[in-house]
Amino acid sequence: MVRLSAWVLAVCSAAHGAGPQKALIVDGQNNHPWQATTPLLKKILEDTNLFQVDVATTPPKGGDMSAFRPNFAAYALVVSNYNGEAWPQATQKAFADFVNKGGGVVIVHAADNAFPEWKEYNEMIGLGGWGDRNEKSGPYLRYRDEKFVKDNTPGRGGSHGAQHEFRVDIRNPTHAITKGLPPSFMHAKDELYDRLRGPAEHITVLATAYSEVSTRGTGEHEPVLMVIGHGRGRIFHTTLGHSPEAMSCVGFIVTTQRGAEWAATGRVKQTVPKDYPMGQVSTRKLD
Ligand code: ZN
């Protein structure tokens, strides 16, 4: 009887997701300071008490990538802070299998620059930039009449203007990630990615930011937070997070935490904290 109770308890606790789930941050190559930002992402995730975080680091650029074989299947969530050389075929397949079987993924900032040639990765991220992306990579997503429409106009995929503070506008307030958040937040100084292109399938844009021409932007409401479905997997993609300063923004922290929980579990139980930014930038010390 005791044994049965313990078994029932174990099953119930697994079913209700009690206790932290395992998450993996992937880094090792990036045109951004991943050595500084990975510890911040780890803290952001672990501060939710929902995740216990490991880090898998690739060899540096030009190194022997053949031994980079993380066991993605052991995790509920993979967070990419990686923008570098191609992974071995077997690692790409293991990552795609992980997502197709229902794994959660968070794509942070320049992780959407990675792997321009990897078709399935681009389906997972929905939109990407740089790496010679252009009209062959897929359409732009443009905000027109309160909807997002595909725009196949030829042109480059991915650029940004000068870094600055900008407002992020929630465009889908009913998704689990954004439900209960104020309609906008002021974001700390960051790059505002624009002109991203990609397959843009099974994608829902949750938030945009207006890319001002005066900061060398596009004059468009650019997608900055989005979710993508791929197989049975869920992907949360944030274009925010260029630097430690950008990651210290409570808007970045909270949307990343909520996006991570949703990607891993399909729901969000976190509440909106009191320091969530409204009219002005709000930051937290993470290190
Ligand atoms: Zn950047």
Image (cartoon, helix red, strand yellow):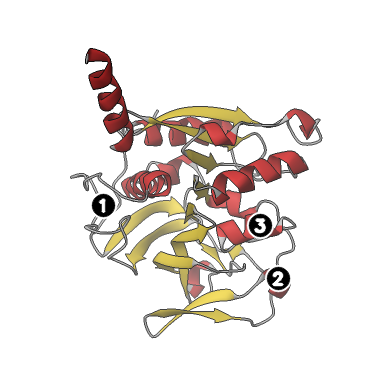
Q: Mark 1 vs mark 3: which is more N-terminal?
A: 3
| Residue drawn 49% across the image and 66% down it | 203
Give the Cα distance between marks 2 and 1.
35 Å
Residue extending furthest left? Answer: 274
| In the displayed structure image, the side of residue 125 where residue 46 appears, left or right | left
Q: Quadrant of the C terminus?
A: top left
Q: Quadrant of the N terminus?
A: top left
Amino acid identity at mark 3:
Glu
Which residue is tagged 1? 277
Give the Cα distance between marks 1 and 3.
35 Å
The image quadrant that residue 71 belongs to is top right
Amino acid identity at mark 2:
Asn
The mark tally for this picture is: 3
| In the displayed structure image, the side of residue 213 where residue 10 appears, left or right | left
Question: Can residue 211 be seen from the camera position used here?
Answer: no
Which residue is tagged 3? 120
| Residue drawn 45% across the image and 57% down it | 164
Task: Tell me whether circle 2 and circle 3 mark residues in contact (CB < 8 Å).
Answer: no
Question: Can residue 200 be seen from the camera position used here?
Answer: yes
The image position of residue 243, as x and y in percent, is 50, 43
The image quadrant that residue 150 belongs to is bottom right
| Residue drawn 51% across the image and 36% down it | 37
